[in-house]
Amino acid sequence: GQQLNQSPQSMFIQEGEDVSMNCTSSSIFNTWLWYKQDPGEGPVLLIALYKAGELTSNGRLTAQFGITRKDSFLNISASIPSDVGIYFCAGGIYNQGGKLIFGQGTELSVKP
Amino acid sequence: DVKVTQSSRYLVKRTGEKVFLECVQDMDHENMFWYRQDPGLGLRLIYFSYDVKMKEKGDIPEGYSVSREKKERFSLILESASTNQTSMYLCASSLDRGNEKLFFGSGTQLSVL
């Protein structure tokens, strides 16, 4: 089946640093989504991307939908302690309404 | 805001028991999903439903079944729990087939002893 490779698996950074993580796939997706999971909670949607080449920001977060439709990245600028959590990328296909393929997750730790 | 509610946050069961995980959403969403989360593996789809009384297998359906008798409720059933089903179970919903945005519940951490 389809798989997403997400990297890095974990990151330990200092508060104020920028963060970058990415996802790659051998298959094409029509939609890329990025979720964040706080400890003890379910994932929450951060950014959704719908067009190849699309670059979208949400506060300190920026994500891009790769031109080939096989990859996406998420950047977090000037990290703060509440950025701690697990970040997941997910790929979707048209008209499958939430039947997503998820990456393995990137666990982010921020040292004050 | 969409609210997806899972009935239990933590559950401990014995091998061979029949286990029911319940999920309710309050925003009249058409689609509901059950994912399983394991460290290093991300989220994997177990079963999903695009309509009442309808169900489809996801990527890892073995050992599980589901029930959707009402639009707002989607139940995951472990017919005979095994230790390899110890995991975090996440329920999610989305508006309809044209909408990929998933809304998740807080999860149920199931331990099978």
Image: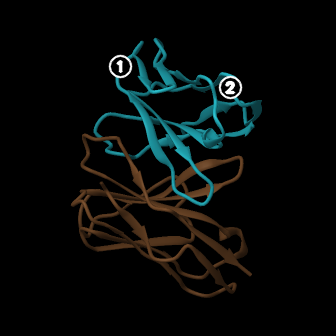
Q: Is residue B52 visible?
A: yes
> Which chain is depicted brown?
B
Identify the mark at residue A51; answer none if there is no mark.
1
Q: Residue furthest front?
A: A112
Q: Give the mark count.
A: 2
Horizontal side of A71 relative to B112 (left or right) equals left
Q: Position of residue B72 (x, y in %)?
A: 27, 68
Horizontal side of A92 relative to A84 (left or right) equals left
**Chain letter for the residue marked with disc 1 in the picture:** A
Mark 1: amino acid: Lys
Q: Residue at coordinates 65% horizontally, 84% vertically from top-left?
A: B13
Tell which circle, 2 or 1, labels the residue nearer the N-terminal end. 2
Q: Position of residue A94 (x, y in %)?
A: 31, 34
Q: Colour of chain A?
A: cyan
Local packing at callout 2 (Cα closer than 10 Å; few below 14, some 14-19, many 20+) is: some
Residue at numbered disc 2: A16
Q: Position of residue A3 (x, y in %)?
A: 58, 36
Mark 2: amino acid: Gly
Asked whether A61 or B14 is in front, the reply is: A61
- Which image quarter holds the N terminus of chain B? bottom left
- Rendered image quadrant of residue A24: top right
